[in-house]
Amino acid sequence: MSSLAVVYSRGRSGIDAPLVTVEVHVANGLPALNIVGLPETAVKESKDRVRGAILNSKFEFPMQRITINLAPADLPKEGGRFDLAIALGILAASGQIPSAHLHHYECVGELSLGGELRAINGVLPIAIQARNNHRKLILPKENTAEAALVKDIEIIPAMHLLEVCAHLSGQHLIQVEFQQEEQAVPATDIDFADVHGQYLVKRAFEIAAAGAHNLIMLGPPGTGKSMIASRLPTILPQLTEQQAQETAAIASISDQGLDVANWLKPPYRSPHHTASAAALVGGGSNPRPGEISLAHNGTLFLDELPEFDRKVLEVLREPLETGHITISRAARQVDFPARFQLIAAMNPCPCGFLGDASGRCHCTSEQVTRYRARVSGPLLDRIDMHLEVPRISHEVLRKGSPDGEESSETIRARVVAARNLAVARSGKANSALTAKEVKQLCVLSEPSHQILELAMDKFGLSHRAYHRILKLARTIADLAQSEAIETSHLSEAISYRKLDRKV
């Protein structure tokens, strides 16, 4: 009988799943069970769950001194994910199951007192790491669909501790699960064809989708700002497998969990304007991803933008530039990806009716200025497109356009073609181009340069706005299937910079 057993499991650090080696030593002495290796409360309590699971599975719980080490010792361990590995370690160290082949497996899962395996969060990053280390993964059956999103990994799903022990003993092998067949993205019941009129707005959203550009809408209440924003995901390109795994890994470790059926769809997040800075960027003593990370590779929609606390909005400035957010605590530092497309909406004034034909607005110019100043200039500077959303006529609202409205599928075909051009050229969407790549790929003719410099001087635009206009013009040219950026493309890009002008 071996008194020492080693079982591999996985911890959690941000969206990573670092290896945790569970070492179990059974020695003579007064009966005791000690867990070392920086365990948090839920892990310390696992000894009671494991004891109950082992006894109720008709195994013998060793009446000896049991020491369990979770290595590395400096990595905080949380949750019930180590229950299965600890139970298997105790059974192997006491000679009740063979330990010869344990090094081929990684084990995660929470145990009930009866020995049933319960689902855990964050299985996708675990499956990716197990695949990369060429080990099989034993996990609760409820987590199978999520783990099966990873290619080239052997998944052994179990519902009870007895099933796992029978498999490891060779008495009754569990059928190995492999990656599921490629599944189509489920259809949605919303479509751009539902939006009547608003041709310029829909054109702007097409450009924003093609280049993953940030956009802000300014218009009276009820003009369709939220309705149009909610339809942006219907024209976005489907995520690549790598992008989908990044996004799914974030959702997997969050409290909301992962929707396996929609994992290839770009995420769409719309937090309420009362959301705190921690809710937006993430936080907590054990850092969790916030809304901007949950929107990674997708869209973050902020309705009623000036109603957000100004300090909350300012935390968006850095991730809008860098594409990630670092959350630092005294004991640890976690980095979450956050490359999202920001879509925002706001009213033109406090009452919302400035410029409306009804003449209902009675806001003073000072009130309007103070209201708009709630959104800082540096944040507006990072938004590529500023768009006015007007009211449409009653006739258009009732009948729609004479030629009919374009469907999301039609618009999406043009968006995908333009995005493919950008990816073939630089490997990324145009909004993510670096300053060096902008200089190489967004070349203007001399007359176009003069137009842009004139606009910079006249409207007081920043150097950041200069680069964003060039990226936007590149996307407009791609939509037109044009290799060169023409003057018309540049002029349209300049027309989308309004809110940060000095005049």
Image (tube, grey):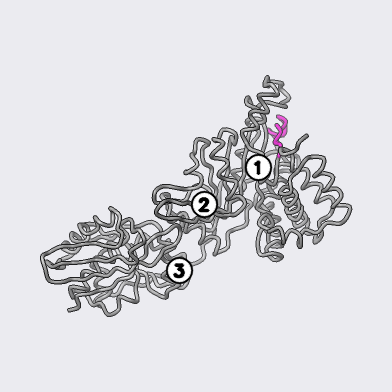
What's the amino acid at mark 3?
Answer: Gln
Q: Is residue 379 above or below residue 8?
A: above
Quadrant of res 499: top right
What's the amino acid at mark 2?
Answer: Ser
Residue beneath disc 1: 378
Please report whichever mark, 3 or 2, sits nearer to the chain's N-terminal start: 3
Q: Residue 11: x percent and y percent?
A: 37, 62
| Residue 390, magenta (yes or no) | yes
Q: Looking at the image, is mark 1 or mark 2 nearer the viewer? A: 1
Picture quarter with the C terminus:
top right
Q: CA distance from mark 1 to mark 2?
A: 21 Å
Of 401 and 42, the residue lying toward us: 42
Whether tag 1 and tag 2 are in contact, CB under 8 A, the answer is: no
Residue beneath disc 2: 293
Whether tag 3 and tag 2 are in contact, CB under 8 A, the answer is: no
Disc number at residue 332? none
